[in-house]
Amino acid sequence: MTDPTVPTRTVDAVVLGAGVAGLYQLHQLREQGLTVQAFDAAGDVGGTWWWNRYPGARFDSEGYIYQYLFDEKLYKEWAWSQKFPGQPEIESWLRYVTDRLDLRRDIRFDTRVTAAHYDEDRGRWTVRTDRGDVVDTQFFVSCAGMLSAPLHDIEGADTFAGQLAYSSSYPAGGLDLAGKRVGVVGVGATGIQIIQTIASEVGHLTVFARGPQYALPMKNPTYTEADQQRYHARFDELRETIPHTFTGFEYDFEHVWADCTPEQRREILEEIYADGSLKLWLASFGEMFFVQEVSDEISEFVREKMRERLHHDPYLVETLVPTDYGFGTHRVPLENGYFEVYHRENVDLVNCRRTPIARIRPEGVELADGTVHELDVLILATGFDAGTGALTRIDIRGRGGRSLAEEWGRDIRTTMGLAKHGYPNLLTTATPLAPSAALCNMTTCLQQQTEWITEAIATLRAEGRSVIEPTAEGEDAWVDHHEEVAGATLVANTTSWYLGSNVPGKPRRLLSYIGGVGTYRQKCAEEAANGYPAFTRT
């Protein structure tokens, strides 16, 4: 038997996760000459795109910007079939990247990291997994993702007698839904994709709507070879533009509300709405995030579009059209025929704000008034413990045995979303207080963060040092800056997973840095250029 206290392997770095960030981080650290071991609980590469195999899963970032931009040949030798590709194609792309860069040999799949403890005397981490690995490593780099800790928050799910699936771990082979009574809980981005995809396939669909969402129509053309060549030819332009925009997309805010007449504003909104992308959210009028009057008018514009497609049905409008928060202050999904689903004879909609779900029973879903909706299949799209959940579910202990789960349970703090005071050589992506915690085209931000981490490690080694850790003062300064920026926006006043509101007891803080992707990138670059003043290095 293996001694659980004796390392089974000694490496320079452990990378947690083999999704978009983890793959690129592994590649960069290997290129630097480090020995690296990556772990992922999934059966193959892909991160969120391996787990989220539910019907209708797809990008709502354009495929040609949701790509790695560090290698022109890697970019141009892959071609998307659609503007917003679906999950199977996305998973194939990530396998293509993995094999092109020969990454598999350093990834251990079907292996969940359960603990990581820092040894102050040795300046190293001991990382343990559910497969018995005990890895001694200098650096522990988290690329676990910001939406990778699913919430299972409805009583009685384990008693359901039919087929039950969580959207976050949907069976790879799918489910046979034809002719069956199917229930979907949740109408967020995931629920919308599932509902619009399966409505025509099932015998009867019951949608349990817990919170209404603004949603924009998606236009998803199929790409010809000429289309693919066109966007390939833009590689240099995209590489120079995308990292510096407000949200890491190719487009940015182009219009100033005060400079336009009411007629011009309407014309601009109509034109951008017709684009069939997230442009209305991310490239119309930036004032919507700061000025209540602007938020109200743009929100009403989107509500009007939604009400029209719901045929102004009072019950559908009440259940599906938001009125208590502004457009863009929550995640905005794209949809394709979603609102029309509710006009089908085989679809029922349950307003769970009127009558909440009490529990799941063997025969179906029971509401607070005692009504039971009998089902053959139940799909739960109930969200995530965003930003923090992936790491708080691991026993991570820093200096003095301090617990990351306990610290984040009291107050969610990081230094630029890249590190945490008290946890030397723990470097992170997609954690709170960086744009990658929600408000960014993920590949844009994850590339930037992994590149920063790679440079920090290279600099440390070149200087003959071995440990990097944020100072308490550096962390305080970043948290104060984050709060100042967030407090100036309407986003900080809403109730959503953006602020951890969907997790009982979670400290309230805007998880994502909202100062802009380009601004964040500049601040990270300045930190490195100035010799890492917010960090100690020994």
Image (tube, rainbow, N blue to C red):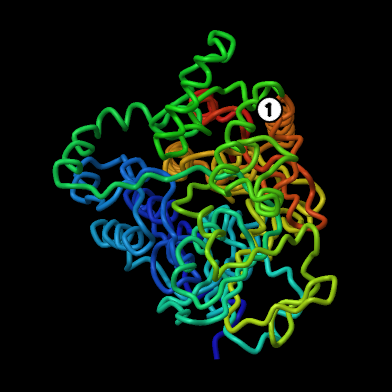
Q: Residue furthest top?
A: 259
Give the amino acid type for the residue marked by disc 1 in the picture. Asp
Q: Quadrant of the N terminus?
A: bottom right
Q: Nearer the viewer, residue 111 or 196?
A: 196
Q: Quadrant of residue 484?
A: top right
In depth, the one of 486 and 319 nearer the eye is 319
Name the residue located 41 percent from the left edge and 28 percent from the top edge. Answer: 251
Q: Position of residue 341 (x, y in %)?
A: 52, 59
Report which quarter residue 285 is drawn in: top right
Q: Is residue 53 above or below residue 371?
A: above
Number of numbered markers = 1
- Check the image and report above or below for 304 versus 244: below
> Residue 68, how many percent across, how many down?
33, 45
User: In front: 388, or 5?
Assistant: 388
Which residue ends up furthest to the right in the rendered image?
369
Q: Is residue 521 among what the camera can see? A: no
Residue drawn where x is 35% and y is 40% of the image: 65
Residue for badge 1: 296
Residue 365 relative to residue 101: left or right: right
- In this view, 10 is above or below 515: below
Residue 306: in sight, yes or no?
Answer: yes
Taking the spot 31% from the left edge, 31% from the top edge, the residue there is: 238
Q: Residue at x 75, y 40 (%)?
A: 324
